[in-house]
Image: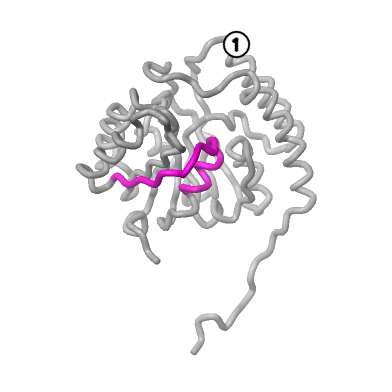
């Protein structure tokens, strides 16, 4: 059955886990962006089992803003699960996502949308990152190891600003940590991706959900999972059918 995302060209997924201090700012930023989006767009909050007031605040936002929608997960599943859930229910031709921490800005989606007709995925690269030196070092090590293992050539897969064709997004094999491998997973489908510099800002509210394990150690383990899956990935294209004949 059709849902309200089918009324738009572009669905912006915003995974939320215990971000009550950021919900009002997210609403204001996205509400300011939607009238200027290059494609008719809606916002889809995915409440990832928050234990604070995030869900009630999201419900309030969606009641007063018709272009804001939400789903809520029964329990916390992590960022990849939240993104997958959002993609699974999206029915617009394009889908993207951004984090709820507001370290990127929705306005930069227009930089990505300019090139999306020519690529399966357009992903941001965080220019002049405002994270601590230790965080940047961890990301540099993890990105370097991932590039060596996947040969995807992506510079910054941790950038939380991406736009994809929904048809490609729905075909991607999902697993925990999947969000770090979107360019590699697009290449498995013989798709293409482009990288575009976007702005980056310091976190001003809420608490980061990342630490040494899920920023550095876990991505190393996920790289081996990707290598195992790559050898077994099924890729096909349908040449013809009679599904629409009567």
Between residues 1 and 106, which one lies in front from this camera angle? Answer: 1
**Residue furthest left as drawn:** 64
Q: Is residue 148 left or right of residue 173?
A: right
Residue at 70%, 24% in the rendered image: 217
Residue at 26%, 37% in the rendered image: 31
Q: Which residue is mark 1?
A: 134
Q: Is residue 197 left or right of residue 139?
A: left
Q: In the rendered structure, does residue 216 fall within the stretch colored magenta?
A: no
Between residues 99 and 46, which one lies in front from this camera angle? Answer: 46
Q: Is residue 70 left or right of residue 170?
A: left
Residue at 50%, 43% in the rendered image: 83
Q: In the rendered structure, does residue 77 fall within the stretch colored magenta?
A: yes
Q: Which residues are magenta?
A: 68-86
Q: How is the image coloured?
A: one colour
Q: Is residue 50 above or below residue 4?
A: above
- Give the x, y percent position of residue 58: 31, 37
Occupied quadrant, residue 26 = top left
Residue at 37%, 45% in the rendered image: 44
Helix, strand or loop status at disc 1: helix
Q: Is residue 207 above or below residue 161?
A: above
* Number of other residues with Cα within 10 Å of mark 1, as a class: few under 14, some 14 to 19, many 20 or more: few
The number of discs equals 1
- Give the x, y percent position of residue 184: 66, 42
- Give the x, y percent position of residue 154: 63, 34
Quadrant for the N terminus, please. bottom left
**Residue furthest bottom as drawn:** 246
């Amino acid at each position: 059955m059709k849902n309200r995302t089918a009324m738009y060209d572009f669905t912006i997924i915003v995974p939320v886990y215990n971000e009550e201090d950021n919900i009002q700012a997210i609403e204001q930023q996205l509400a300011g962006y939607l009238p200027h989006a290059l494609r008719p767009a809606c916002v889809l909050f995915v409440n990832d089992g928050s234990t604070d007031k995030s869900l009630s605040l999201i419900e309030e936002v969606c009641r007063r803003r018709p272009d804001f929608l939400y789903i809520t997960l029964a329990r916390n599943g992590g960022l990849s699960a939240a993104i997958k859930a959002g993609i699974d229910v999206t029915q617009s031709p394009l889908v993207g996502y951004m984090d709820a921490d507001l370290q990127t800005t929705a306005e930069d989606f227009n930089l990505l949308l300019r090139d999306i007709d020519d690529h399966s995925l357009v992903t941001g690269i965080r220019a002049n990152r405002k994270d601590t030196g230790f965080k940047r070092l961890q990301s540099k090590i993890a990105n370097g190891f991932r590039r060596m293992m996947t040969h995807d050539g992506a510079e910054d897969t941790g950038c939380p600003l991406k736009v994809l064709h929904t048809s490609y997004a729905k075909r991607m094999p999902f697993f925990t940590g999947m969000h770090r491998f979107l360019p590699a997973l697009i290449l498995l489908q013989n798709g293409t991706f482009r990288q575009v510099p976007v702005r980056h800002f310091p976190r001003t509210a809420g608490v980061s959900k990342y630490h040494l394990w899920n920023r550095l150690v876990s991505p190393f383990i996920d790289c081996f999972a990707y290598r195992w899956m790559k050898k077994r990935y099924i890729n096909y294209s349908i040449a013809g059918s009679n599904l629409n004949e009567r």
